[in-house]
Amino acid sequence: MTDSPMSASPYEVLGVPASASDEDLRRAYRRLLRETHPDTGGDPQRFIAVQAAWERIGSPDARAQYDRGRSPVGEPASWAPSGPSRAERPASTRPGARTYGHPGGWRRERYLTLLREWVGLGETIPDPYDPVLVRRAPREIRHLLADALAEEETARRLATLGIGYTVWHDVAAGGPDEKIDHVVLGPTGLFAIQSEDFGAPLGIRRGELVGEALAGERPMHELAVRAKAVARSARVKFTGLLLVLPDEHLPTPAESLGSSRGAEQVVLRASVLLTALRDGLPDARPVGGNEIFEVRTRLQAAVRFA
């Protein structure tokens, strides 16, 4: 169970209120183990989630830590903004990709605004990233923070691509609340990338992601609309439209969802993003040096940041 603002709490997984007694918690856990066990026809993913939930709150000490907003190892959930740590920086000394913009910035600003409105204007918020506060917030607010974190993690990965790549973060794409998280240009093409965290595994049907966690959202359709606006403004063509999800939320490393205006639409796990960008998409035409220079010049002149 990951520490994501969108993840179901252990209490929600076990189907009990946070005020449940230890005995009620134990009974719910045992009942769900029987119902979800794969040997009796249960759902393997739910079975794993039930076990993970019990590890988080099954003992009095673990439950007390969780209720104070702590992780399983006793550390607070680190949802506040931070730069890449030494361990997250590339081990190589070679130059990284050229980057522009502030990844996650727009969503964090929007998160803080809505959080203040929800708590109440004039009320003091000692820590807007306090896990206890975040977990109580409405879905829209939690989703903004979860996507900001996903966006920042993707940005850290993209920075390691190398000097042959250029990355624009938080690119305005049409309306005031419309943006593309990352636009990446390199030898394998031009890509529009959206980083998402809906807090649960998703499926694919008819060229779109599906699942209860989406709450009616159509992320690939929305990315295609935004990419069209940027392509028209900069007079460029995208090679691929990529939706990046946490690894545990997608059953396979990558899936094609068809194409939109010549751009391949792909949903993929975060861990395979760099491979897709470096190796290119199947049947995609490589981009030569002069063409890269021309496309980069057009984007530099046209890109506006959210």
Image (tube, rainbow, N blue to C red):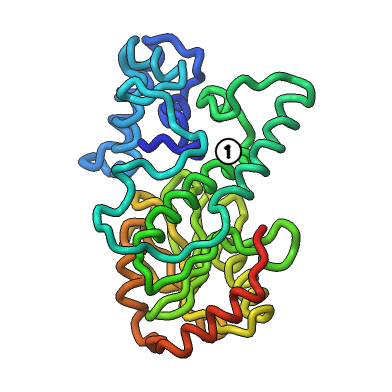
Horizontal arrangement in the rendering, residue 58 relative to residue 140 (left or right)? left
- The percent position of residue 291, horizontal first and vertical second, equals 48, 89
Residue 290 to residue 43: above or below:
below
- The percent position of residue 258, horizontal first and vertical second, equals 47, 78
Farthest-out residue, right: 121
Amino acid type at mark 1: Arg
Residue positioned 58% across, 67% down in the render: 223
Farthest-out residue, left: 39
Choose between 22 and 180: the one closer to the eye: 180
Query: Residue 4 appears in which quarter of the rendering?
Result: top left
Does residue 28 appear anywhere in the picture? yes
What residue is disc 1 on? Answer: 142
Mark 1 residue element: helix
Query: Residue 302 appears in which quarter of the rendering?
Result: bottom right
Does residue 208 appear anywhere in the picture? no
- The percent position of residue 233, horizontal first and vertical second, equals 68, 78
